[in-house]
Image (cartoon, rainbow, N blue to C red):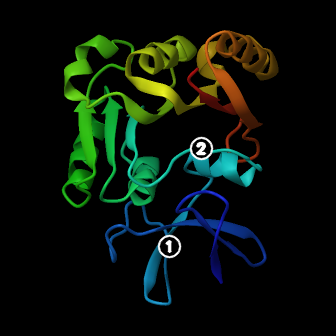
Amino acid sequence: MITQTKFFEIFEEKKKKRSLFTKNLVPGKQVYGEKLVNQAGVEYREWNPMKSKPAAAIMKGLNQFGLKPGDKVLYLGASSGTTVSHFSDIVGREGMIFAVDFAPRVVRDLVSLCEIRSNIAPLLEDANKPETYRDKIIHPVDFLFQDIAQKNQADIFMKNVEMFLKKGGYCLLAVKARSVDITQKPGKIFNDVKKFLRDRVEIVDYRELNPFEKDHAFFVCKKR
């Protein structure tokens, strides 16, 4: 039986293992080959924690998430739209996701996704230069998520938080330790990022993502 979790529009099924789901905004359509399950006339899409860092963080016991129906979202590092599609399910038709990526190939995939999901707007932009897309986003946004494999990923995160996120809004950061400094131990990098963020935002939850994502950490923050 699929049941509601403590998070808005995120569901779970507990059999031999726990599985996460979101209600499919576009019934009958898959995005990345995920399992579709129909229960009591409602179609759910399985949210794979091996392919989505927010799902991995929830599986690791996350206590706060912050995304809710109707939210305006800035998503940095959207790639081909795996996690974006689940955010699309959660925010629903009243919400909107501004999905930013700088790689033309994956933005083409995003454009295809937007043809069936009207609450996603793809942006071919460099998240390190938020001033170049400021006029394309209805801001302030309610929620910001970043999943970018760049050395200065914490700096990029804060630039966008300061420019786009409303006061009190949730901002989530997936940190890829090996992209910051391959010579340092991941634990030290995570601690350095934690110190950097503490001076700028309120950290309300933190999880390391092993075994779902090696050498990754997940921060849930709120803008002061």
Q: Secondary structure at mark 2?
A: helix
Give residue 53's mark.
2
Place residue 27 in its image quadrant: bottom left
x then y, percent, for residue 224: 58, 20
161, above or below 7, in the image? above
Q: Secondary structure at mark 1?
A: loop
Q: According to the image, label 1 marks what residue? A: 35
Q: Residue at x 45, y 15 (%)?
A: 162
Give residue 124's mark.
none
Disc tally is 2
- From the viewer's perspective, tell me whether residue 100 is left or right of residue 181: left
- Which amino acid type is shown beneath numbered disc 2? Lys
- Which amino acid type is shown beneath numbered disc 1? Lys
Of the 4 image quadrants, the one containing the N terminus is bottom right
Q: Nearer the viewer, residue 58 or 77?
A: 58
- From the viewer's perspective, tell me whether residue 196 is left or right of residue 70: right
